[in-house]
Amino acid sequence: MSLGREEEVEIRRPPRFMPGERVRATRHIKNDGTYPGREIGENLVRKGDEGYVRDIGTFLQQFFIYAVEWVDRGTVVGMRARELMSLDNAEAPCSAESNTNEGTAR
């Protein structure tokens, strides 16, 4: 039985973001009915908003959910890694690139 497009189990790897890390939303996030006190379809986060990761949880023993505090909005919203980008850490080169010159003197 296939899970369709969501076959990857994220929690087999370390979390992409850590508590305290500054992040930016990469897409608009609307209330899907799981955010209390807001109408379904109401914007919770706008693309480009900046916030801080407060906590990390999991969903369905498959995905990391990052509790992000959006200071300007005064809210905390659960976000997936694909909806965020780090403002604190630049992307590290892939391991193949970083190991190619390891151990060689120049």
Image (cartoon, rainbow, N blue to C red):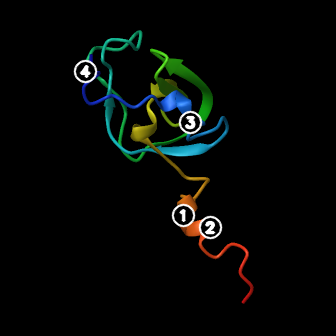
How far apart marks 2 and 1 lie (CA) works out to 5 Å
Q: Is residue 41 left or right of residue 38?
A: left
Q: Are marks 2 and 1 in contact (CB under 8 Å)?
A: yes
Q: Which residue is mark 4?
A: 41
| SS at badge 3 | loop
Establish if 34 lies above or below 98.
above
Q: Is residue 19 left or right of residue 16?
A: right
Q: Nearer the viewer, residue 46 or 80?
A: 80
Decide: few, some or many residues near mark 4? Use Cα within 10 Å; few <14, some 14-19, many ≥20: few
Q: Where is residue 75 shown, x and y percent of the image?
A: 51, 25
| SS at badge 4 | loop
Q: Quadrant of residue 92?
A: bottom right
Residue 99 bears which disc, if any? 2
Reading the chain from its start, which is encountered first: label 2 or label 4? 4
> In percent of the image, x 38 and y 12: which residue is there?
34
Give amino acid for label 1.
Ala
| SS at badge 1 | helix
Of tags 3 and 4, which is closer to the observer? 3
Q: Are marks 2 and 4 in contact (CB under 8 Å)?
A: no
Decide: few, some or many residues near mark 1? Use Cα within 10 Å; few <14, some 14-19, many ≥20: few
| SS at badge 2 | helix
Reading the chain from its start, which is encountered first: label 3 or label 4? 3
Of tags 4 and 1, which is closer to the observer? 1
Reading the chain from its start, which is encountered first: label 4 or label 1? 4
Q: Where is residue 41 shown, x and y percent of the image?
A: 25, 21
Q: Which residue is mark 1?
A: 96
Q: Quadrant of residue 91?
A: bottom right
Q: Which residue is mark 3?
A: 13
Of tags 1 and 3, which is closer to the observer? 1
How far apart marks 1 and 3 lie (CA) works out to 18 Å
